[in-house]
Every structure is written in C-alpha cells, then in structure tokens.
Amino acid sequence: MRKERSLTQEALADALGVTAGAVYKWEAGLSSPELEMLIRIAELFDTSVDTLLGYEMAENRKRSITDQIYGFIVSKDRAGLEYAEKALTKYPNDFNVLVASAKAYMSFGMEERNHGLMKRAIELFEKASGIVPHDIDPKFGKITIIGNIALLNYLVNDRDKALDMMKKNNEGGVFNSMIGCLTALKGETDKACLNQLANAFWDNIAEIENTSMGLMYYYSDCRDWARVKTIARWNIEYQNSLRKNGEPCFFDKTNAAFLIAESYAYFKTGEKDHARELILEAKRLAEYFDAAPNDHMDIVKLFDISHETSTFTIFGRTGEETIQTVLDLIGDKKFTAFSQK
C-alpha cells in the first residue's frame, strides 16, 4: 500500500509519527505494529484493520468480486448493478472494484440510454481516477478513465465538457478519433474537424497493418498457412479499396509487403506457381512505387485533404527495401532464394 501511493518509508513514518526504523522493521517482519498503530495505518490507507491483518486473503476476495462484476457485464445481467453496489459498500475505496462497478454502470447506462446510470458511472470513474495505483494495467489507467468519463459526459449531453476533457488529455493522439467524431456530430464542417478525422483514420490504418503483420507471423509460427493467406489478402483488398486513384502511393509499398507474406504461405503449402506470381506482383508494385514515391497523406478517396505529414514505416523508404525487410523477417533461406530466381 505504501508503494502503491509512492510513499517512502520515511514519508510513511512521518505520517504515522514513528521512526523510519520502525517502518523498516514492520516491512522486514522483524516486528509488528500494535493495535492502536494498526488502526492509524488503516485510516491512513483508507482501508480496514481486517484487510491489514489478512491482506492477501482480502486481495483474492476483491479479485473474485471484480471478476464476477465483469461476468455480469459480459452476460448482460442487470443483477450486476446490485452486486456492484454491495461490493462498493464493502470496498468503497478499492481502485479495481470502483473501475469494475463504473464499467457495469457505463455498459448498462449506454445501452439503455439511462442518464442516471451513466452519471453514477461518472461518479465512480472520477473517484477511481484519484487513486490510480502506479503499477496498474495501462488499459485501466488514468487516460483510459478520462476517456470513459468524457464519453459519458457527451452521452448525458454535456458535450462541451466532454470535448474539452479529451482535447486536454489527448496524449499521443489517443482521442483523435473520438474528438473528430464528436466534433462532427456537433455539426462542425471546418478543416480542423476533417484534419482530426483524417489523422485518426491514418492512425487506425497503421494499427490494422501492425496487428495484421503480427497475426501473420504468429500463424506462420503455428504453421496455419490458410490464415496467413486470408489476412494478407484481406489487407491487400482493403487498402486497394481506399486508394484515390491509380497513381503510385504508400499502399503500393505496404501491399508489396503483404504480397510477400502471402507468397510465403503458398510456398509453404507447395503451391509454388502461385507463390511465384505473387512475388512478381510484389516486385512490380515496389518498382512502380520507387519510380515516383508518394508517402503523403492525400491518397485516400474518403477525403480530399492536403497534409504536410508523410507516412513512415519500419519496412524502409523504398519498395525494394520493403521486400527485402519482409524476406529478412521471414528468415527462410529457401524462400529467399526462391524469390530471387
């Protein structure tokens, strides 16, 4: 509990009116606080003496409670709200219980469009945001909580507050898509809104590419070549559906990467003629891109926007480098030799 609150032994000793040596001995198991001191420690950490005396048991019990709350959410069982309130009565200041309960109220509140439930979720999230442990899973961290609070504020018609929260906490562009979406829903038609949405769109394309590449390498390790083929082909067709025209663009380079991955899957299933066709297509796309490189962000037909920002990739600057990088990542000497024939 001391470490969760980023307190040194000296700071805890000062708060309790004891020496740092006493705190050290408690933590080292060389001595134990007397009952009166246990009460003071419990008050300081906003917990109970029972919890201090059986901390591990209490933690296991709380984990079981939060798991059950999430179970109610998954099964869409509204009894989870009553269960959450009982848990909050028992553990009113436990971060994980607060977050799980807030998510329950948020889930049912949004689906039922019930402002009362959503406001209760806001209340619980706000309380949790003030006691975020330093070692918490990032998916339950402060920025995530702020995003949930902002979305709930928007849904209960406090739209300006919602957008202001997201804009002030938009670390790494994490709320770009929501800011753009909520701004557009307000009826905004200026370039700033479009830029926000365009940037969010590009971020999502990058996320899809990274996830797809990861999945292909995972399924390659599992020798599940059918899924590698499916993922590669879906990405190629998806990106082709987005491009504005037939001019060279960033998608030619990324599609070359997916074509090499798809070719490798066919190579491993013995379909070498088709694997060869895919390699030739990848090389053609790479040469097409390298003849007139275009890494800018104005290549998607969904929006007509000029933007100074260019796209970057781990595969290299050119189409040729992209193909070589993917071959190196695959690391199959026989396939590399096959691709160069």
Image: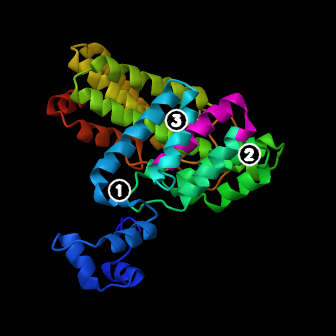
Which residue corresponds to mark 1?
50
Residue 33: percent from left, percent from top = 27, 73
In this picture, which residue range is highlighted in magenta?
97-116
Question: Mark 2: few, some, or many residues within 10 Å (few <14, many ≥20)?
Answer: some
**In the rendering, at what x and y percent does residue 308 appear?**
63, 56
Q: Is residue 254 left or right of residue 264?
A: right
Q: CA distance from mark 1 to mark 3?
A: 22 Å
**Do the residues bearing badges 1 and 3 touch, measured as CB atoms within 8 Å?**
no
- Closer mark to the observer between disc 1 and disc 2: 1
Disc 2, SS: helix
Q: Which residue is mark 2?
A: 154
Q: Is residue 174 visible in the rendered structure shown here?
A: no
Per the model, the C-alpha gap separating discs 2 and 3 is 27 Å
Give the residue at x 21% y 20%.
268
Q: Give the answer, above or below, for where 276 lies relative to 69.
A: above
Closest to the observer, 111 or 307:
111
**Residue 135 picture location, percent across and down:** 37, 59
Return the disc, 1 or 3, that comes first in the chain's sequence: 1
1 or 2: tag closer to the N-terminus: 1
The CA distance from mark 1 to mark 2 is: 40 Å
Q: Inspect the magenta stretch and tell me whether residue 112 lies in it.
A: yes
Q: How many numbered circles are shown?
A: 3
